Amino acid sequence: MSSQRSGGRCGRAAKRAGSKAENAFDAAWLNWKNPYPPVEQFSADEIEAIHDASLKVLRDIGIKVLSADARRHYVNTGMSEEEDQVIRFDTDLLLDLLSKAPPEITLHGRSPHRSVTLGGPNVGISTSAGSPNCSDLQGGRRPGTQADFDNFARATQGFDVIHFFGPVVEPQDVPTHLRHFGMTRSVVTNTDKIPFVYFRGKQAVADTYEILRIAHGLSYEDFCNTPVSYSVANSNSPLQLDGLMCRGIIDAARAGQMMILTPFTLAGAMAPVTIPGALVMQNAEALAGMALSQIIRPGAPVCYGSFTSNVDMRTGAPAFGTPEYVKAAFASGQLARRYNLPLRSSAPTASNAPDAQATYETQMSLWGALMGGANMILHGAGWLEGGLTISAEKFIIDVEVLQMFAELFKPLQVNEATLGLEAIADVGHGGHFFGTQHTLDRFETAFYSPLLSDWDNFENWSDRGAVDATTRANQIFYDTVAAHEPPPLEPARLEEIDAFIARRTAEGGADIDR
């Protein structure tokens, strides 16, 4: 990898070289803190109106809960069950339950420096998650495989601006009842970052938690008191919680692992066409799901999930990175802070290729999420085609953007040295600052050094083959994969994991339908 590229990365090669500049990047990129006050879309009175409308929905219309077990828990706590599996909520009781959820959550990586705190100004970034397809310049768009999953895990390990590893692509060459074994083994052997756990039935969740418990070397009791993973429960908008999601909410709460309740409220399709109306539905569904978690285990780690956007009213297709998405992201931050909960947002795009559209829509989504006060960004690297594809080239393009945001969040110091009065006096009128001691002392660390961008002039760029950003991104992705070094994992733990997987595979794997 060229010196220019390594200057924009936080990889192990830079650490081995002992570069002070790279280690300074590590400290800021491993632990993001947003120094800016969040943008607020609505006044305090308007947020209260959305809050009040959400409570009316929960009290008067209710949520259809397709899990008998979940309905039993709601009713035993004081909610009422109506006809057709609908739960109506005592809103005072609901708010009391939510008040038990922690405002900050620390998730523990296998390596101590990989731990991430969410809440307040803290920010963590995840890869894209759950795509059935992957793409690159070599093979085009294709169904994902276990090998593709492994490569994205290796690439993720190489960039410190990514803190969480999401299920980047579905390994469709592995049967569904066994798929979680290969995915989780890949996560714990190729990366030490915080992993995602799918809610795919009680057995699959239990299997995955057991592999993570072994990898961390925790007792069963310690595991249930140490969040080391995160999961997403999507409500089935409008106003439904399905059986598998309820099962997952219950399992995660009992295991003490973080659950993000994310409604998929697309204005004009599964939610009212107005952004305030869509936010009312988002809020009602999120509160209902998080309340179930607190019923099961008061204080269980939960995160408020935001994914409200709009559709193309000509076709019904989801649209992302839109002005409406940004406004909803700003408002979602206000709602999460209203309940003193961490906020999850995303960086999606509807583009079908890693092109200009993908870049500007992702940038718009990120500005909305981060400036709205999000604590966790899911789908932060690689997302394409509304989530149907993860792209190797888009992954690197997104890493470049994320590194720039990480640098934006680093505070600037104002002191005698940075004010530069001595340098200004030395240069005087009409000179330049290239050769001043002030510049020479700082030129290696003064500015962000890009991973992907080529800042050379047209003639030099042309002489080197006129390689565009997408092609450069492809090379960086596979250079990173090739340079991957697995993080340490004690051999005895890996042996125990492999023995567990072999036994559970022989038993038939997991029933992912319940």
Image: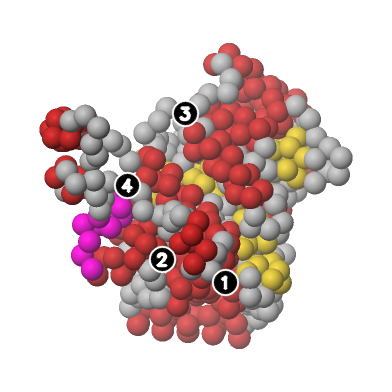
The three-letter code of the residue at mark 4 reads Phe
Q: CA distance from mark 2 to mark 1?
A: 15 Å
Q: Which residues are magenta?
A: 17-28
Residue that badge 2 annotates: 158
Residue that badge 4 annotates: 447
Which tag, 2 or 4, sits closer to the chain's start? 2
The one nearer the camera, 364 or 510, is 364
Residue 149 disc label:
1
Q: CA distance from mark 2 to mark 4?
A: 21 Å
Which tag, 4 or 3, sits closer to the chain's start? 3
Q: CA distance from mark 4 to mark 1?
A: 34 Å
In front: label 4 or label 1: 4
In front: label 2 or label 1: 2
- In the rendered structure, the answer to whether residue 494 lies left or right of residue 382 reads left
Residue that badge 3 annotates: 38
Q: Is residue 502 above or below residue 435?
A: below
Q: Is residue 377 above or below residue 464?
A: above
Task: Label 4: state its secondary structure.
Answer: loop
Magenta stretch: includes residue 18? yes
Q: Quadrant of the C terminus?
A: bottom right
In front: label 2 or label 3: 2
- In the rendered structure, the answer to whether residue 402 lies left or right of residue 249 reads left
Q: Residues within 10 Å of mark 4 (few under 14, many from 20)?
A: few
Which tag, 3 or 1, sits closer to the chain's start? 3
